[in-house]
Image (spheres, rainbow, N blue to C red):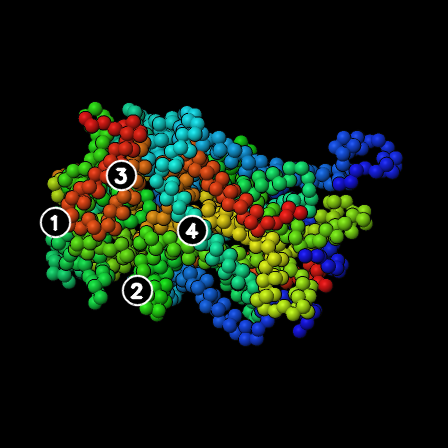
Amino acid sequence: MAEASATFRVAHATTLTDRICRFLRINRLTFAKYCFCYLGLIPVFVIYWVLRLEPIGRTFILSFYDWHLIRPLKPFIGLANYQEMWSDENFLLALRNTTLFAVFVVGVSVVLGLALAVFLVGNLRFTAAYQAVYFLPVITPMVPMAIAWKWIFDARYGILNYALSWFGVRPIGWLTSPDVAMWAIIIMSVWKVLGYNMVLLLVGLKSIPAVYYEAASIDGAAGWGMFRRITLPLLKPILLFVIVISTINAYNVFTQVYVMTQGSQAAPGAPLRVLVFDIYQNGFQFFKMGYASAEAVVLTLIVLALTLIQLRVIRMDEE
Amino acid sequence: MNRRTPPEKKTAPGSTRRTFLKQVSAAGLAAAATPLLQPRVGVAASSEVTLNLWTGYPELEPFYKKAAEEYAKTHPGFKLETLSSQLREMEQKLTAAVPTDTGPDLFDIGRNIALIFADGGLLPPNPPKVMSLLKSKAYHPVVVEYNTWKGQVYGIPFQEGSKPALFYNTKMFTEAGLDPKKPPTTFEELMAAARKLAKKDAAGTLVRAGLSLRLSGQGSGVAEKWWYVLHPMGGDIVVKTKSGKWRNGYDNDAGRAALKFYTDAVHKYQVDDPKLRHDADAFVSEQAAMLMREAWVIGELKAKGPTVQYNTVAVPRAKRWGGMTQPWSLYVTRNTKHPDVAWDFAQFLVSPPIAILHLTMTGWVSMRDDVDWSPILKETPQFKPFLVWDKARGQYTEPAIPVWDELETKLAERLVAAYADKSLMDKPDAIAKRIKEMAAQTDDLLKKAGLYGTD
Amino acid sequence: MTGKSRGTGREVWRRTGAPALSHGILLVGSLTMLFPFVWMLATSLKPADETLLWPPRLLPINWTVANYPVVLNAAPFVRYFLNSVIVSVGATIMVIATSLIAGFIFGKYSFPGKKFLFLVILASAMFPFETYMIPLYLTMKSLRWINTYPGIAAPYLIMSFGIFLMRQHIAHSIPEELLDAARVDGASELKIFLRVIVPLCASPIGALGILAFIQAWAAFIWPLLMATTRNMYLMELGLSTFQFRYTADYHLLSAAAVLNTVPMLIAFIILRRRIIESVALTGLKG
């Protein structure tokens, strides 16, 4: 941002804009840019305020109360909810489960999504059909899918155990043994988000100009080397995006766990406690809404910390 | 990484902008047209009344619609709009709508939510006409007591949410050498029958449950079904003390016997297995020989398992004999514009002829004691244990304490772990210890809620 | 094949025989992807008494299409469909518009408070929706938006991920020189946005369009809270008509689910070409 030059000052009359520019020590161009930025963001932030920030803010404040959700009485209890959390075995279990879940789902779905996008970005035949097929899980409604998956995971007649039996693996009680249930949900969640990641990574791959590949191939690069040196680095922005939002979504997992392990629809679901389920149960079943709000705040802080770490590690410059 | 040459000119940038502007104006038009697309629900002419009814039982919607048609015959101009969703979601919806007066005219819900509304002054108390109906012979006093909070009675008991009976497959009975006309009446007989009915394949895996128990699942259901066994054995999840306080009711022989029943069923005698299909789906597809469930299973059997041969009988007894009653009630909201019509229609919904419609259309049973069920029983005798309550059989209900849901849910989680624990098999000390731990948690929750007492 | 080829994929996988291997792997994966959907489709073509068969059969014994008319009559699904379309399309347009402008500003400009504001936007996506649902409901009540289209669409009108995606794309795929060139030509920032940035974002617009559309189409708990009369229900809510207290009419549920999935599939097919085949519009060939 250059200082205003003397010519500049002489050429224009002293207007309010000029006075502001001089006061803020910026030139007219920067001022125009700032105006554009803030004005452009105002509608966006108004919407954010009404639809997100204000309700979230209210919830944050509620976390310091013992709020029953329906009863108007709200005694202020300060940090009591937060203190209770750290000795609540359900919360700690949920934290452990959700973290484990997130690590595996993000790891596997991003790597597989990338492989898939790489396969499908080129001139392979039937690409369109493959893309549609891999995207299908993203759009099919959860409840009928859960029923189908309960069958796939069935200990006796499930397809999965049947396929594994070809390799001599004994039948596994996917949804009935608590230790294995986590893996069943992870498998199903990866299945569900793979197409989502694929689509986003396709955007990333397509925006890498062919120029770079040509230049690299002239320099003698090929195959894996090309991928590592050209594709991956240029894919960083979108890759970072995919990793961050996969993490956020993984920590916020709820619907599939709820539907897969709930008691109705006659399925032998072993309960799998994840954070949002704990929040939901505390808030809407036990009506301890203040406590649930506190859990939500902690969840957000954890995810925020992880995101900041990811942004730092992959080291994107803000420009 | 330098960026090299600047790009070529793009083709027709204006077209993209034009389409973008088109989209924006389309959105603008849509937004402007929104008021025109608003639904117009509400009162029109003077005799035209439209009521909104919300239910957490989607299967009841056709019934409500039919009942409304019947009502409209004597009340021209009456219309009913219904809205349904899954129970948990409907509870959430009501929790948001009722306190903010954006709710319906009528709704049906369980007591866990209604009590909280009543406590918050969000429900109008029953009008005199309704009270005289409730105090009459039509309703069992236990049921009226169930809907009472702080001296006031709220809502009209509408549908029995529990009162299970024992379903058993008569064909399997005969094959196993049991007499289908003499089903088990005690828990010992029940276990003995289950052992004969359970079927294993060549590899020794259980393929048919002798008795399908609720061994896992979210929520409080596991504890509720355990109570089906605990209560006859002489225990309860919580008991009221003389001073009006509460403490756990199962850290005793009854509790230990009830847990032993399950442990034996799963590990010792292997009449049920968590890996099998459970509940009505299992009984309908003939993967379970016996099941303790409510009347709606009969409807399921008619639709999805018409070839299954089965019968029903009252749940067995042990030290005592009783069934759990869990009335679901109809409530009128305080923001309704037509309270008279709403209460009148609610009373109509529980009247005996409509109660019969209720049963035939949905399989759920009315709460009234004064309905003549003989035409139904002639056609489907399996309804008998649900409709005709033996005088010797008692009824028990859930206690009206605010921490009940949490208590039952946390107990359920511990029970699920206990059922899966093979080390409890034939180890009375281990079972006693486990029961003690569970009871300690129950008492703890009662203490936190300030409800605990020992006398 | 050199230089001018559009086959970015070819550059990445040079080896011969790779196509055959690719097809093999993709096909196996496809089967896994498809299987639950095939199950759902097959169940929708079964009569009621076949839905609980054990051992389970994938394909129906007595094929029937009767479930579909039953579904359409059981609830006003046509109306639900219309509602879903209005809400989803409206949400998609709003998300794309807001993400483009905010993504551009965050991607290409520096101004005081930028990092903080961006973090606020991102952080608001981390807070579980179920928790601030009720305060938002109260806001909707004071705006008198309960049981209205704007009310139902409200949480889906803005998407932090959308802003993030646009920002990444604009910041890293659109060279600053382009903007400077336009500025030299005397274009205002707004003009640069409309004439330079937007056309170059065809690919992420397509991707974001799909994701925003799906987010609104598959929404469940919020539309349920918002709708107080049946005729404002969305299709996803209509599915619960067939789910009962302790069980479900699986054949009807599956048929309704198939009907619910088809529009999203169509949206994907339409927008897919924008994402994938937008190389021509990026104009960034050497």
Q: Which residue is mark 2?
A: A170
Q: Which residue is mark 3?
A: B326
Where does residue C93 sit, x and y in percent of width and height?
Answer: 61, 48
Q: Callout 3: few (<14), some (14-19), or many (20+) C-alpha neighbours within 10 Å?
A: many
Where does residue A68 sit, x and y in percent of width and height?
Answer: 40, 31
Q: Disc 1 on helix, strand or loop?
A: helix
Quarter holding the N terminus of chain C? Answer: bottom right
Viewer-side label of 2, 1: 2
Q: Which residue is mark 1?
A: B188
Mark 3 → mark 4, Cα distance in angstroms: 38 Å
**Given the image, what chain letter belongs to the residue carrying mark 1?**
B
B40 versus B293 height, above or below: above
Left or right, B275 with respect to C166, comes to: left
Amino acid type of the residue tagged 1 in the rendering: Glu
Q: Disc 2 on helix, strand or loop?
A: loop
Q: Which residue is mark 4?
A: A101
Q: Residue at 31%, 54% (x, y): give it.
A: A176
Disc 1, disc 4: CB below 8 Å? no
